[in-house]
């Protein structure tokens, strides 16, 4: 029987298919559409639509799809063929072995950014500081990937993540809670480190580093689905680095580690380290206690940081 393309409107291309047949035909469509990993994408999408893991997909491969199941696969498939990343379809992405929730306001954590975590841990271990009560600041935290990865490895550390997006901060807060790290992570709405106070021991960031004129040439999965503010580094791609440098000089104690990717395609990190000097934890009161909702509903990055507070719903 001749099948119409998956993108055809008003037609359910998987109606009457078995699970196995749907996977095979979806992989074929993805291959024709030029996707990099068609078989893997097809397996993940079908499994997500049906709520089945890999083993269950294989065990039920001959089962005929129900109408609702076929429709769910078709809807997700159309989005993937439009180049929406699989992680955005799932609403989650793994980073440093941690399952992280993502949303439209967060950059998808990428494997190459793990080099920042590796560099930080290497420097900490060289100074024998892994068990100390280190203070971490993650500027432009997004989903909280860098901060939460470091907190998962440094059991006595405390950290604050900043972002200008409330939706991103909500996502990071949820990730901290899901990972059991809420007691050591706080989140502040501000531009980079504008409202934080010194000193911190480790400063990390994954800033926008794409020159504005180059954004149009990015891969569609990045250009069309990552938040523009997380990509646009200004005319030369260095606006974020300038902002970080201005805050780092003020925030970092002599016990500093300053880490961030070198730029587009970078596999390493820029690091500055100067030994250790203990001191009081003071990055605003945000670093001292967990907060679950927002103190204010707008982005006020003046002299006082916008912080999470229990019992206040930002939608009110």
Image: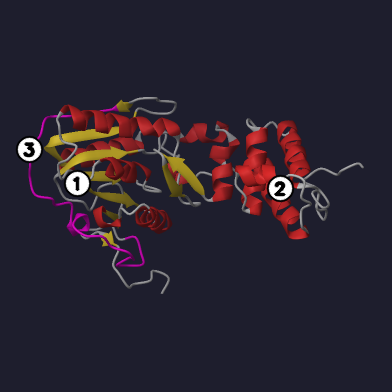
Task: Please indicate, yes or no, whether residue 83 appears anywhere in the rendered image.
Answer: no
Magenta-drawn segment: 270-299
- Residue 201 seen in render: yes
SS under mark 1: loop
Q: Residue at x 50, y 48 (%)?
A: 92
Q: Main secondary structure of the magenta part?
A: loop
Q: Quadrant of the N terminus?
A: top right
Q: For numbered disc 2, what is the local secondary structure?
A: loop
Considering the image in quadrants, where does the C terminus appear? bottom left
Kindly identify the residue that appears in the image at 72 percent across and 41 percent down: 23
Q: Position of residue 117 (x, y in %)?
A: 32, 34
> Answer yes or no: do the residues labelled 2 and 1 have beta carbons within 8 Å?
no
Q: Between marks 2 and 1, how big is the CA–CA gap? A: 46 Å
Q: Are marks 2 and 3 in contact (CB under 8 Å)?
A: no
In the rendered structure, does residue 275 fall within the stretch colored magenta? Answer: yes
The residue mark sitting in front, 2 or 3, is: 2
Numbered label attached to residue 60: 2
Q: Of label 2 and label 3, which has the lower sequence position? A: 2
Mark 2 crowd level (few <14, some 14–19, many ≥20, 10 Å Cα):
few
Q: Residues within 10 Å of mark 3 (few under 14, many from 20)?
A: few
Q: What mark, if any, has residue 156 been given in the picture? A: 1
Q: Which mark is residue 277?
A: 3
Disc with the residue nearer the chain's start (2 vs 1): 2
Question: Quadrant location of residue 267?
Answer: top left
In magenta stretch: residue 210? no
**Closest to the observer: 315 or 289?**
289
Residue 291 is drawn in which quadrant?
bottom left
Which circle's residue, 3 or 1, is located before the other in the chain? 1
Which of these two is toward me, 229 or 115? 115
Image height of 242 relative to 165, above or below: above
* Picture residue at 72% right of the left edge, 56% below the top: 69
């Amino acid at each position: 029987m001749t099948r119409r393309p998956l993108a055809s409107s008003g037609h359910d291309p998987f109606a009457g298919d078995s699970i196995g047949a749907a996977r095979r035909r979806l992989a074929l469509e993805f291959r024709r559409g030029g996707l990099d990993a068609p078989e893997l994408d097809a397996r993940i999408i079908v499994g997500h639509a049906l709520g089945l893991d890999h083993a269950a997909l294989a065990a039920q491969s001959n089962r005929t799809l129900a109408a609702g199941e076929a429709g769910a696969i078709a809807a997700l498939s159309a989005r993937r063929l439009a180049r929406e990343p699989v992680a955005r379809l799932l609403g989650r992405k793994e980073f440093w072995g941690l399952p992280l929730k993502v949303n439209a306001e967060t950059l998808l954590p990428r494997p190459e950014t793990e080099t920042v975590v590796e560099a930080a841990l290497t420097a900490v271990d060289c100074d024998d500081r892994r068990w100390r009560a280190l203070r971490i600041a993650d500027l432009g935290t997004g989903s909280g990937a860098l901060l939460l990865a470091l907190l998962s490895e440094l059991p006595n550390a405390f950290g604050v993540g900043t972002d200008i997006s409330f939706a991103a901060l909500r996502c990071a807060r949820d990730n901290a809670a899901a990972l059991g790290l809420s007691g050591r992570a706080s989140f502040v709405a501000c531009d980079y480190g504008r409202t934080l106070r010194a000193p911190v021991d480790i400063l990390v960031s994954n800033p926008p580093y794409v020159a504005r004129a180059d954004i149009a040439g990015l891969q569609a999965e990045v250009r069309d689905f990552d938040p523009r503010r997380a990509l646009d580094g200004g005319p030369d791609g260095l606006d974020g680095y300038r902002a970080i440098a201005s805050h780092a000089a003020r925030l970092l104690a002599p016990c500093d580690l300053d880490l961030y990717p070198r730029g587009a395609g970078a596999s390493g990190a820029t690091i500055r380290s100067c030994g250790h000097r203990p001191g009081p934890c003071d990055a605003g009161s945000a670093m001292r206690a967990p907060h679950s909702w927002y103190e204010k509903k707008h982005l006020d990055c003046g002299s006082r940081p916008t912080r999470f507070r229990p019992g206040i719903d930002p939608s009110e």
